[in-house]
Amino acid sequence: MKKTALVVLVFLLTAAAVGAEELEAALYRSIDALSRAYLTEYPEQGMKAGLVILEISENSVLAERNRLGSTIEAYLRDMVNRSLVYELVDRANLDTLLKEIEFSLSGMVDPAAVVEIGTLAGVRAFLWGDISELRDRFLVNLSVTDAETGRVLGTAGFEIEQRALVKIAEELQYSYVAPNGIGLTAHAFIPAYMFYDMYNNNVLGMADLGLAYRFSRNFMLSGALLIAPTFTGEHYRWDEDVPVLDVQPLLAATVDPWGQGGGYDVFSQWTAQFRATFLRLDAQYTLNFSPKFNLGLSGGIMNAIGNVRMFVDIGGDNSGPYYRQQLASEDPVVYYQQPFIDTASVEYLFEDQFLPAFKAELRPEFFITPRIALSARVGFLWMKPLKVREIYAFHASWWFYQEGKDAATWTPDPDFDPGSFYESASRDEGEQRASWIYYGWNPLLRPDGQYWQYDLTSVYAQLGFSFFF
């Protein structure tokens, strides 16, 4: 037999509360009082009563701006989950019913409907409340209502310092928003130490633009495009004089058409710029040291999108390698060859390989807001060196890939005889003919005699930010 409803009014006045522990203690005492009120009404309760937490009203501009109602709800859910009297009912599937229930509490729906709604939803009680300002403090009032009768079984309340509750709400947002969800990331990739001396002038800075998905507080998947922009300047530079005949030995047998003693004696400058786009995929385990700071341990793979390109200029401005140009006299017609200077850049394409690079890194991350984080990444990248695949000069091309040549060992044949300059048969000789046109030049070699290759193996750093939805 039910006893007459007993309304228990308990105001738990706390001292200035600082931190989540004080809030938890106040809410624990409130839930305990509301549990005793329910047991007073139903002393023979044999199992946990299903309870739904309704929205906590924010009767203050400050409370509404800082979403303090959501903060109280979050802590209440944790308290109810540990309760021996109540069993938390998920309200995700009860939205339509809850709207009717909330109307009923304001007297807009016949109270008899509350009984039917509570029965249909398997709910025995509703927990609701509000937050209002009281000078420099907040007053939190909570009530529990019988779902079968619509009667208020008990109320409880407590005071808490405004600054303390606002601080708790901020920390809670960091705890729930920052470590989870989908994020946009933007970082600058800067190799700090290269294991291959390909970049001896400007560091090959790359833009890292990506997406991240945190499906738990500790695990995250991310992907990004690493792009080497064109405005990063010269990545390779060689300023020491290199004798022309060391680069183009067949020039020694060429008549000097300008009377300059063989033209330029040295190539005084070589420069190269690289352009590349990579796709990276990473998995990360996150150590959460505080709501605002975490440390990620990440590993992943990288793969080039398209071919890595390099643009080489030889000899500085208005200079370049010599090439053969066929000319003809007017009368009688006699064909002869003269050297001219090719001032255009030489384009290199490197081979494409599946998954040529692997990386491991540390990712410290500091959240300046619950959604925006500053992050740094320090890691090691290993890459299998990419060899040259094709070379395009203005007057000839070297197609190592199609010809099946090994670009790591190929050298021009000094005795190559193409016959007539324009015979189609001679053009089928491929790389040998291209080097013959450029007077024995081997474009695979750098000015120091090493072979060109693309290798990003390095210790690197990344600086940037992330935005999480």
Image (cartoon, rainbow, N blue to C red):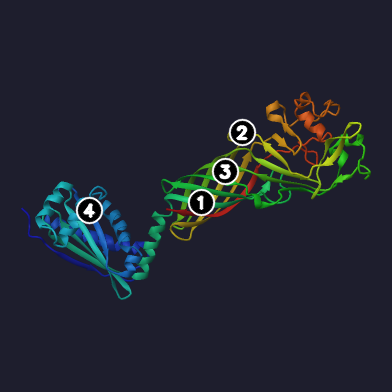
What is the distance, in whole Å, between disc 1 and disc 4 at their CAs?
38 Å
For the residue pair 64 and 278, the one nearer the viewer reads as 278
Dot placed on the residue nearer the N-terminal end, 2 or 4: 4
N-terminal-most mark, 2 or 3? 2
Q: Residue furthest left?
A: 1
**Mark 2 or 3: the one toward you:** 2
Residue 185's disc number? 1
The circle on residue 266 is none
Q: Secondary structure at mark 1?
A: strand
N-term mark: 1 or 4: 4
Relative placement, left or right, of 161 versus 323 is: left
Q: Provide the residue designation for mark 4.
A: 52
10 Å crowding of disc 4: few (<14), some (14-19), many (20+): many
On residue 360, which mark appears? 3
Residue placed most toward the observer, 194 or 203: 203
Closer to the eye: label 1 or 4: 1
Q: Please identify the residue farthest to the bottom as the structure is shown.
A: 135
Residue located 17% across and 56% down the image: 101
